Amino acid sequence: MIELVIKKYLDGHLDVPSFLERPEIVPDSYVLFEKTGSSKSNYLPSSTFAFQSYAPSMYEAAVLNEAVKEAVEGMIVLDEISKISLNSDYNFTDTTTKEYRYQAVFDINHY
């Protein structure tokens, strides 16, 4: 399962925890990620993932977003990953909860 591969890698390469769903006890800074879509071409799977970087300030969320982008791009060294492409990244502050966050969207080809 590619989600577990990504989580394990992020947990070893970021200074903040990563989650597949919002934790009950929310740390000050963390990364939440989810698969937003997938496809398969010539039996090779590809998935789109959204990585949300949460932090106490807009600046800290932006800095964490940069660290997340670097970590995700670093996953190319894994045997399970064959291609990583940044689709987009942007300020994604949650106006409902008033939490600062950035979102980076990646297309990842994997096995």
Image: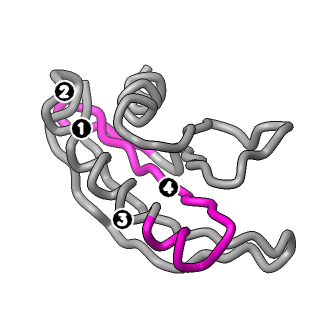
**Label 2 to label 1: alpha-carbon separation:** 6 Å
Left or right: 89 as drawn, with respect to 92 = left
**What's the residue type where badge 3 is placed?**
Glu
Q: Which residue is mark 1?
A: 75
Nearest to the eye among marks 4 and 1: give it: 1
Residue drawn at 21 percent across, 43 percent down: 74
Residue 55 magenta? yes
Magenta: main secondary structure? strand
**Residue 78: which numbered mark, if any?**
2
Secondary structure at numbered mark 3: helix
**What's the residue type where badge 1 is placed?**
Met
**Residue 50: which numbered mark, if any?**
4
Secondary structure at numbered mark 1: helix
Q: Which residues are magenta?
A: 38-63
Q: Quadrant of residue 19?
A: top right
**Label 4 to label 2: alpha-carbon separation:** 19 Å
**What's the residue type where badge 4 is placed?**
Ala
**What's the residue type where badge 2 is placed?**
Leu
Q: Which residue is mark 3?
A: 66
Q: Residues within 10 Å of mark 2 (few under 14, many from 20)?
A: few
Query: Where is 71 relative to 82, above or below?
Result: below
Q: Residues within 10 Å of mark 3 (few under 14, many from 20)?
A: some
- Asked if the residues shown at circle 2 and circle 1 are in contact, with their CB atoms under 8 angstroms apart, the answer is yes
Secondary structure at numbered mark 4: strand
Image position, residue 91 (x, y; %):
54, 79
> In the rendered image, which quarter contains the N terminus?
top left
**Residue 21: which numbered mark, if any?**
none
